[in-house]
Image (cartoon, rainbow, N blue to C red):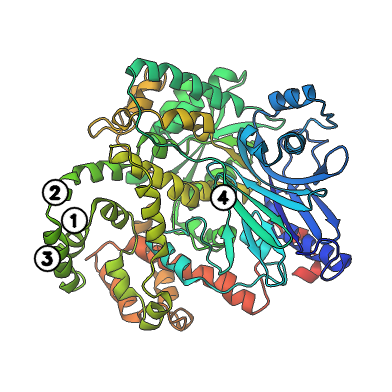
Amino acid sequence: MCGIAGFVERDVTGTRGGRQENTAILDRMCRRIAHRGPDDQGMFLSGGVALGMRRLSIIDLKGGHQPLSGCDERVTIVFNGEIYNYRELKRELEARGHKFHTHSDTETIVHAYEEFGTKCVEHLRGMFAFALWDERAQELFIARDRVGKKPLYYTQTQGGALVFGSELKALLEHPLVESEMDADALDAYLSFGYVPDPLCIFQGIHKLPPGHHLRFAKGRVTIERYWDFEYEPVAAKREEEYLEELRALLDEAVRLRLVSDVPLGAFLSGGVDSSAVVGLMSRHMSQPVKTFSIGFNEDTYNELKYARVAAKHFGTDHHEFIVTPDICEIVDELVWHFDEPFADSSAIPTYMVSKLAREHVTVVLSGDGGDELFAGYTRYVRDRKHGHLARLPRVVREGVMQPLSARLPHGAWGRNYLRNVSLAPLERYIDSISIFTDLNKHALYTSDFKRRLGDANKGRELFQAFAESVDTGDAIDPLLYLDSKTYLPGDILTKVDRMSMAVSLEARVPLLDHKLIEFVTRIPAALKMKGLETKYIFKQAVRGFVPDEILNRPKQGFGVPVQEWINHKLRERIQDTLTDRRTRERGLFDARYINLLLDEHARGRRDHSHPLWALMMLELWHRTFVDRRQDASVRVSPQTQNLMPVAAL
């Protein structure tokens, strides 16, 4: 696991500022993401080409230094991730005449590119973001894994150079990269709590979408999709046929991810997904699996009971940590690691469980991805319960209910519900997962910010386009595809990557193995969500293996008692932050509406904990990445301060 960064000029035969200046720029970009790879730094510079990386040593500890070149030095790569089938692929490439000089998975990508060209990505099984310079073709090739486990930002400067990196903060070290806030991305954040791919909070900067690769030559960028979740109508088979293959693929996905030259463990929440992963690990490991769990003093959110059941059942070496409101003091640190505004408060326990795990291991497996694959979210249940609303005549929904909800005052009983049920099914789902709906944004935004946005709603348009591209005849499949393309990479995988990398811990996600995904997307939705039972087929696959107490437990996300914390420990800070002069002078939000939210929440009239948290995280992001950049004083992570040159501090 590593972090990569670099840039390629439009004219690669020369350099814009000379080799010494380019070396200094690349060094700053790499050092800014040193937390992703504390073990090593490597750089490649040739003419207008600069590739750099920070390494966290996992496989081939001595021979895996990057950048790495092929035999004739035509191809040079920097790579972040793990390729789990590299040994099999290496044997295939050796049979084709390729000579290897290391035991690293990185070198396998180089030879795969030499053999297959840009189609090399189709041969890789794992998680990855890599940048590869082809000297002969004078072309940069960048690829991101199929589901977005590893991040990749890029931008093209006014001078035509392409700048890229694992994290946004690395790009901001390049002197020609601008950082003006993107209004559409901000609007999307306030809807969903994160900035969905390919949008970025800064104008002109993009996230390479999962399952895509990018080619850059002579100042021209070409992006192409090479993989996607395939939801198509299928002829159903017997349930037992699905179960047999599903069990085999689950076991294989976990087994492949146990390859490591450093200590390895697992996150254990006590849910079905993480318990199944830990159980499968225990089948293949000679030592007890080291497991790590987080709990809360607030009983409603505490899952330790179930984590202990799983740990005892599988005989793990179990470790726990209780998260208290005092942990909120690390919020500023988390803002720095996410680069963009991020409102999922479960980042706090994710960070703490990563920190706990890092004291014992360097690699962990997690159970993320099961909810998107097997229809595990309770919002799918809610959507199915509301399915009858689609039968309401359109003239009633749009001609009567919507205008009525718009005229009702804020706080009126039933206002938000009336608006939601008046929408078409897909719009209703998007509205139900939004922190701020379009109805509430009208009151939140100032007139100036509304003018900046105009009539476009890129976030909603993006979500609708994804969902509308799937038509299998079952209403659940479009929602699974939508969440797999947006919430999964934009929130879940971003959270796991940033919080684990913040402490230099590698997290592997076996339920998102692409061969497993390609099988599961062919399972009829009726077997994923049977009636109102979520994850039916997955639970059947692990029944008799995972304890019934876990299989039959109520669904509970990896949540945080934000409401309780906001009402007590964080109350003054949120109040002070959102009413501060700096916050109001940004001209984004109507101060009267902010005061209304604060007042209603304080009096217990409405639970606005999530909207208030989202607004506070946005303001803290502004202060970290906008104000301090304008002041030429970029925040340095405590983990990397000792790695930064004095001039950078």
Q: Which numbered disc, 1 or 2, marks the residue closer to the eye?
A: 2
Q: Quarter holding the C terminus?
A: bottom right
Q: Which mark is residue 400?
A: 3
- Which badge, 4 or 3, is on the more N-terminal residue? 3
Residue 528 placed where, x, y %?
A: 33, 31
Task: Return the residue at label 4.
Answer: 499
Q: Amino acid at mark 2?
A: Arg
Task: Return the residue at label 1.
Answer: 421
Task: Return the residue at label 2.
Answer: 391
Q: Amino acid at mark 3?
A: Val
Label 4's element? Answer: helix
Residue 505 placed where, x, y %?
A: 63, 43
Cα separation, mark 4 vs mark 1, equals 37 Å
Depicted 512 relative to depicted 452: above or below: above
- Which badge, 1 or 3, is on the more N-terminal residue? 3
Residue 328 visible in the displayed image: yes
Residue, x 37% and y 62% (percent of image)? 191
- Which badge, 1 or 2, is on the more N-terminal residue? 2
- Which badge, 2 or 4, is on the more N-terminal residue? 2
Cα separation, mark 3 vs mark 2, equals 15 Å
Camera-side residue of 213 and 240: 213
Q: Which numbered disc, 4 or 3, marks the residue closer to the eye?
A: 3
- Asked if the residues shown at circle 2 and circle 4 are in contact, with their CB atoms under 8 angstroms apart, the answer is no
Among the 4 quarters of the image, the one containing residue 100: top right
**In the figure, is residue 31 to the left or right of 251?**
right
Depicted 121 relative to depicted 50: above or below: above
